[in-house]
Structure formats: structure tokens, C-alpha cells
Amino acid sequence: MSDAMTNDFRATAPAARPPRAFSFPAVERLTLSNGIRLLLAPAGDAPLTAVRVIVRDGSDQDPEGRCGLASLTSEMLDEGTATRGAIDIASEVADLGASLATGSDWDASYVALDVLARNLVAGIEIVADVVRHPAFEPGELARVRDERLTAILQNRDEPSVVAGETFARRLFDGTPYAWPLIGNEASVGAVTRDEIASFFAERYRPGNISIAIAGCFDAGNAVRTIEALLGDWQNGPAPERRDFSAQLATTSTIAIVDRPQSVQSELRVGHVGLDRSTPDYFSLAVMNGILGGVFTSRLNMNLREKNAFTYHVRSGFSLRRSRGPFVVSTAVRNDVTGAALREILAELRRIGSGDIEPAELDEVKSYLGGVFPQSVATASSLAGRLEEMEVHKLDPSWFDHYRDRLAAVTADDVVRVAREHIHPDRVSIVVVGNATEVRPQVEGLGMDVIGC
């Protein structure tokens, strides 16, 4: 092939093919007599099964002054039960060729098992013991607490963590979202075994629990196993929930966290956003894809490709049970901190201007729709979608029409949600960097500048 023919070939991108047909796996829903809800999605050919126990309370229910309590409680579940020690649990899980993890996010707490299909019954037996009979042994709690306190101290030396935590405190002061999921030094150091046991007794009840199973398994056999292990677990009254909703700031501010030795600045720009129940979910997904949610986004093309300020920049809405943050995150050289912030603010204003190119709209919709099947391609990822459906009470057909609803988003939809939900004149900006070098740059942005 001649050089001319080769160059012509490379100059023209291949035409996009229509998306392959895709159907979200069928989900069977059952409720045991004690209130435990089951979501069963047999799917796939690989001999793997994912089990997720979902407790519908997470770190958003941490009591005042006890941030980290929900995550400490969940972390302690597999550190020993009434009949198994922590080493026993780890050994049995390894013998099954499985993995077991526990944890919490803002909206829920979880026990996650990934296991060979042939060992599912034995795996569920361990999970049932962990979620129903945790011992909260004082010696194990002391070890876990010390490990967490060490992690909290280590985070003080991570500029990205400092930036995220400072940003959260400024947006969500007075709410659980103001503090890290893992807690802070004061709260973790003070928490007692009795507090953990009380949180468990109040929240870990059959009526507050769902179990999602996805992958290769026999649904009837799984139901019988769970019924035998958990069916006699007595339910109790529904736990009281702490409701809250942070509000948008009225003006923009810049907070600088001084790190004199830093050669770059960690930047966070954003404001209080929306909750997961927003009817604008799909329009927001496309709008944010254009703004800063994919590699070819405007923010990345501007700050990375055009100006070489950064290696990567992203934007996104954290859609939680209550209103989470909208945030733009990046790290730039000290000497371009002010210029980078100007470009970020300019893009936040531009996205609502009506300047939406058909090609970028189609590209983002095609990308988001194209990667969706990959997000349910494994037993574990499918179980994650079932978790999402259960925690946020999504309609059973939500994912059946996911790609169609993305494809239906128009340029007018993008502009509307940008104007309604992006607020460039009400942002909180956090800069973690060399204050002496960056303060003169940001003082020209016309916002109040404070030190943290």
C-alpha cells in the first residue's frame, strides 16, 4: 500500500456502527416473612456468583460527633462472630476460592461475597453468620481502631485527600457529609464497643436488609438456603433516620490550605448538587459527560490538551440519598493555579450558554450508552446495579430502558439542566498548595479568599 493510500485511510475515522442489542438481565424479587428482600438475577456463563447483603443505612446515619461509626460497624462484621474468629473466617473464605468484604458508603452498609458457583451455599452460610452474629470482640476492635487512626493520620499528608475533606466541610457543615466516611481522629478514638453494638442492633434488622445475588446460581436453591439461615431472624421496628439537606451558598469563596513545600495545587471547585432521585438523571449524565465526565470533555480538552495545565481533570455529581456535591477535581502546577481556575469557571459558564455542538452531544451519548453493557458484564458488577436499584428505590424497569433514555437526551435538555444545576457564581473553591505562590493569583478572581 502506498504512503498516500495509507494516509488517506488514517485521515478518515471509520463510521460508527449501530449499538449492539442489549437486555438487562431479568430480576426476580421476593420478600421473606421477616422482611428481608431478595433480588435474584441469574445471568452469564462464567461459574461465578456475587452475593451482596445491603443494609439500607450508611454513614449518613452517623450520630453527631461519631462520624465513622457506620463504617467501623461494618468493618467489624468479619472480624469474628459468636462461633468463628477473624482468622477462621478468612481461612474458610480462602478455602472456597472466594473473597469477602464489608464496608459502608453514605447510603448503605454492605457485606460482599464473590464465590465460585459450586461453593455458593457454603459462602452464604459464612455471610449469614457474619451479618447476624458479629462478636465485636474488644481486642479486634482495638486493632481495627488503631489501623483506622493510622490511616487518618496518613491522610493528612495526601493533598488530594486534604482537598476533598476541606471541600466537604465547606459545603456540608452541620451535616454528616461534612466528615470523612472513615471518621476523624476524635470520633474514632472515642467510639466504644457498646456504641458499635447499639448501631448494629438498631440498623441491622431483617426489615432493613436486602440480599442481591447475581451470576451463575439456581434461584430456588439460593432462596431455600437463605430462608434456612435467616428466616427465623426476628424483625424489629424500623430504625429512625436522620434527614438533612444542605443548601447552596449565596456567594463564591476560595479557601487555601497552605502546604509550603508543594510544587502543585490540588483544586476542588463546586457546590451542593442533587440527590439520586432527581428526574434529570439522564440529562445530567450527558451534560456532565460533555463538561468533564469523559476523556474528550471540554474541561479535559481545555486544561490538558490546549493549556497543558494538568494531566487530568474531571467533573461529576455525587448523587446520594440526600443532596451530594457537584465538583470539578484536578491538580495543576503552582504557577498556573489562577489561570486554571479561570478556565474551569469559564467552562462552567459556557456549558449553560447554549453552545452545544451536535457532534459532541452524539459522541457523549454514544460513549455512555456503549459502555453501559460493560457495567453489568460480570456477576460482581451486575450485583452492584442491583444494589443501586435497592438502595435508591429505582423502578424495576430502570435499567431496561437505560440506553434509550440516554439516547433521547437533546441539546435543549443539556442546556436546561446546566442552567438549573450548575452555579458558577455560587461555588466553593479549595486550593491545597503553596499559599505564598498561589494567593496572589486567586485574589484576582473577585471572590473572598480565606486560609484554612
Image (spheres, rainbow, N blue to C red):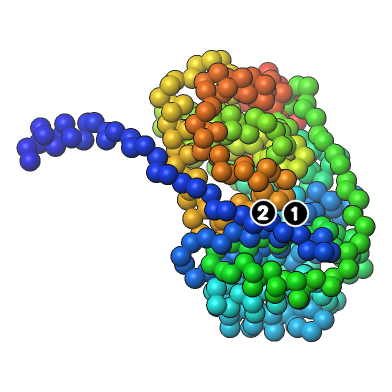
**Could you classify mark 2 by the number of other residues whose Cα lies within 10 Å: few (under 14), some (14-19), or many (20 or more)?**
many
Q: Is residue 290 above or below residue 163?
A: above
- Check the picture and name the quadrant holding the C terminus: top right
Instruction: From the viewer's perspective, tell me whether residue 402 is left or right of residue 110.
Output: left
* Residue 147 seen in this snapshot: yes
Instruction: From the viewer's perspective, tell me whether residue 118 is left or right of residue 242.
Output: left
Q: Quadrant of residue 358?
A: top left
Residue type indicated by callout 2:
Glu
Which residue is located at x 87 percent, y 55 percent? Answer: 66
Which residue is located at x 47 percent, y 51 percent? Answer: 374
Query: Which residue is situated farthest in the front direction here?
Result: 220
Q: Which residue is mark 2?
A: 387
Q: Residue 330: give x, y in percent of width and height.
A: 56, 38
Residue type indicated by callout 1:
Ala
Which residue is located at x 81 percent, y 34 percent? Answer: 246
> Nearest the camera: 186 or 377?
377
> Nearest the camera: 258 or 185?
185
Label 1: element kind? loop
* Residue 257 seen in this snapshot: no
Mark 2 and 1 residues: CB-CB less than 8 Å, in contact?
yes
Instruction: From the viewer's perspective, tell me whether residue 101 is left or right of residue 295.
Output: right
Q: Is residue 361 above or below residue 133?
A: above
Q: Residue 375: give x, y in percent of width and height.
A: 52, 50
Label 2: element kind? helix
Q: Which residue is mark 1?
A: 108
Of the image marks 2 and 1, the number of the one nearer the N terminus = 1
Instruction: From the viewer's perspective, tell me whether residue 68 is left or right of residue 352.
Output: right
Between circles 2 and 1, the one closer to the viewer is: 2
- Check the picture and name the quadrant holding the N terminus: top left
Q: Residue 288: give x, y in percent of width and height.
A: 56, 32
**Could you classify mark 1 by the number of other residues whose Cα lies within 10 Å: few (under 14), some (14-19), or many (20 or more)?**
many
